[in-house]
Amino acid sequence: MAGIYIHIPFCRKRCHYCDFFKSTDFSQKVRLLAGLKKELESRPSELATEEITTIYLGGGTPSVLLIDELKDLLSTINQNYQVSPEAEITLEANPDDLSQATLSAIRQVGFNRLSMGVQSFSESDLKLMNRRHGVMQAIQSVKWAKKAGFSNISIDLIYGLPNQTLEEWERNVRIAVELDVQHISAYNLTYHEGTVFYDRLKKGILKELPDELSLQQFEILIRILKKAGFEHYEISNFCKPGLYSRHNSSYWKSKKYLGVGPSAHSYDFESRRWNVSSLAKYLHGVENNETYSESEILTEQDRYNDYIITGLRTIWGISEELIQTEFSALYFSHFQKIKEKYLTSGHLSCMAEIVSLSPEGLFISDRIMGDFMVVESC
């Protein structure tokens, strides 16, 4: 079982909070699509014995591509990889790129899951973030997606925005619930260096929401979604029973995946690879059969820390047996010491040798993961 991620770096405009690799210059789109196909055709040996169970087009904004361009990418994957008939195939999309006809066409070419970048159901928040769509566009897009046959729809929301009140955030969450989507990803705003929000924060134009208010918003999110029947299966992710993001879950469960396109990452248990975060350098490398990526062999410490960071975020938690069998005794000893500390404080739970965050532990998850990680070799 493995996944394929394709990075589409094009956006019609730059959102003020986003630090993902992207470009508003579409002049190289044809070259990029040819480069993506060439990379896909050159790497099947890396997944030769693996069945592809998830395909994910992210970005950027993949929904800016034409239907035939999307179809061509999926066709290239199907021609070169062993794709499961039951594969989860996700397209990230912005509401303003979507019409009833477009959504029907997206469904017909093979996508069976949508991840919509809604971010907020407040017009003022959307304007502050420099989003392209309006509230009614977002709501209508979800309704159209359902009519087009999508039964697995995810929406993204952001909390902790400047001046966002508890009442405003609760309204956001309740609208999302009323839309009856299957999955909600909600992220606390982070001020990434290089973004407009970061610059405005440093200049004093924006003020960061106090931590206690962000924490209260997180509590509101958990309370409302739990009551609405959502499973809180990862710190920032909620789904209707069983409808996890299979692609993202493969990251958290340390499954093998192939990343294609500029800035995309790959993982195969023993090493990590990342493509260059430059469209020009990526295209030059692909077109001229030159190197366009870097890689590293994972040390025992890397593998242990990766497992802690990914596993502890989820309801599937950390397997004590795996820690004991896959890592040296010193790592297991360190793990046991930290585990006992947080079991005693009530921030962890342990059932059938699976260690996971308790409801209280969710609110200090960064601290707990930091304590479990090893910064110097055991």
Image (cartoon, helix red, strand yellow):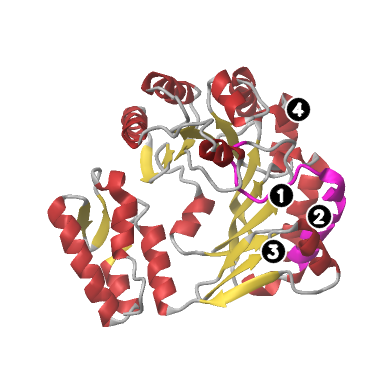
What are the residue bounds of the magenta stretch?
Answer: 16-41
User: Which of the two marks, 2 or 4, is nearer to us in this view?
Assistant: 2
User: Which of the two marks, 3 or 1, is nearer to us in this view?
Assistant: 3
Q: Amino acid at mark 1?
A: Ile
- Is there CB contact under 8 Å for labels 2 and 1? yes
Q: Is 82 on the left-hand or right-hand side of 299?
A: right
Dot placed on the residue nearer the N-terminal end, 4 or 1: 1
Q: Is 360 on the left-hand or right-hand side of 283?
A: left
Mark 1 nearby-residue class (10 Å; few <14, some 14–19, many ≥20): many
Q: Amino acid at mark 3?
A: Val
Q: Position of residue 338 (x, y in %)?
A: 22, 64
Residues 89 and 156: in front is 156
Q: Looking at the rendered structure, which numbered label has been put on residue 8?
A: 1
Q: Amino acid at mark 2?
A: Leu
User: Which of the two marks, 4 or 1, is nearer to us in this view?
Assistant: 1
Q: Position of residue 300 (x, y in %)?
A: 41, 78
The span from disc 2 to disc 4 (Cα, nearest Å) is 26 Å
